[in-house]
Image (tube, helix red, strand yellow):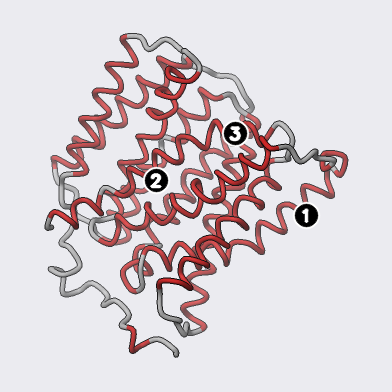
Amino acid sequence: MNGGSRLAALAPLGAAVLWGLTYVVSAWGFETVPPLTLALCRMVLGGAVLLAVVRATKPRRSFSRAEWRSFAVLGAWVAVSIATQYVGTALTSAGQGSLVTILTPVFTLVLAVVAFDEALSRRGALGMALATTGTVVLVVGRSGLDTGGSLLGSGMLVVAGVTFAVYTVYGKPLVRRYSALEAATYATLTSLPLFCVFALGEFLAQPGAFDVPVTPRLVAAVGYLGVFGTAAAWYLWYKGMEYVGAGTVAVFFFAQPAVGVALGALVLGERVGLPLLVGGSVMALGIYLASTTDTEPSREDDPTAPAPVRDSDSAP
């Protein structure tokens, strides 16, 4: 890859940083809005922003029914992932939740190797192992080996990790055929009916929880989650897969807890001890090793990769 391609391949790191901030922002929203309803608000705003950008920058596409089904399946996976993540987070402690959700990159790597035959070099495997180890040390050093929270909540977080891995890996063909922006946009839009069903079920189960005061803090939380935590982050996440494999992209997921620790130190004055420094250093080394390993040829060098849609292939 050339310098520009390598820089674009680092885009998922930006997504991980933005997602690291969503833990704090989501907590603000959970104070007043039920989790599935907050997720719906996030997705509606994120989908609207993505669609506006697509309309302004991309040619109008004419999708077949099969292609719409592909987007809808992708949207269903991400809807289940976000819903179970939000409910699972509400049922567990922060430490337990972090330890469970860092399994997502591992699930993604396994799926990428099994489903798309992505090669896994020794350097890449070592990087993934180091990143996993360093992240566990970092999370345990911050929160302790926390066993709080419910078994149901932990199970939901495992489901969230697995389904987000599926969203990552099975989005790859659509990213390669169209673009990261379009794949993220139409997957988000097709997820909205499921989010509406989830939010309706939440309302029927606890209607009294919907007497929500609209405060500047709540508006800011929804705004961040929709614009940055969804629209920008999901675009950046898929952008990396235009140049490298899903297994390589997944390793950047480990940066999320590091961002949380850094925010705790900078904003909340939390002490950063030796275990956190060691864990963060090992994690950073693992991310570097895995992210600088080419798990597959670039699109330009891979004759078997699906060709991107040309402007002449789109509807007027």
Q: What residue type is labelled 3?
A: Thr
- Choose between 213 and 140: the one closer to the eye: 213
Q: Position of residue 174 (x, y in %)?
A: 38, 69
Say what secondary structure mark 2 lies in.
Answer: helix
150 relative position to 107: left or right: right
Q: Nearer the viewer, mark 2 or mark 1?
A: 2
Please give the residue where the numbered disc 3 appears in the rendered image: 89
Sooner in the amino-acid sequence: mark 2 or mark 1: 2
Say what secondary structure mark 1 lies in.
Answer: helix
Please give the residue where the numbered disc 2 appears in the rendered image: 15
271 up-or-down from 97: above or below: above
Q: Which amino acid does label 2 sit on?
A: Ala
Say which quarter of the image contains residue 129. top left
3 relative position to 246: left or right: left
Q: Position of residue 277 (x, y in %)?
A: 29, 16
For the point 76% across and 41% down, which residue is it?
Answer: 214
Sooner in the amino-acid sequence: mark 2 or mark 3: 2
Label ID, residue 161 = none
- Choose between 104 and 225: the one closer to the eye: 225
Please give the residue where the numbered disc 1 appears in the rendered image: 200
Q: What residue type is labelled 1?
A: Leu
Q: How far apart are marks 2 and 3 (CA)?
A: 20 Å
For the point 41% across and 56% down, which residue is it?
Answer: 235
Q: How crowded is mark 3: few (under 14 residues within 10 Å), some or many (20 or more)?
A: many
Quarter of the image for the C terminus: give it. Answer: bottom left
- Choose between 66 and 180: the one closer to the eye: 180
Q: Position of residue 142 (x, y in %)?
A: 44, 16
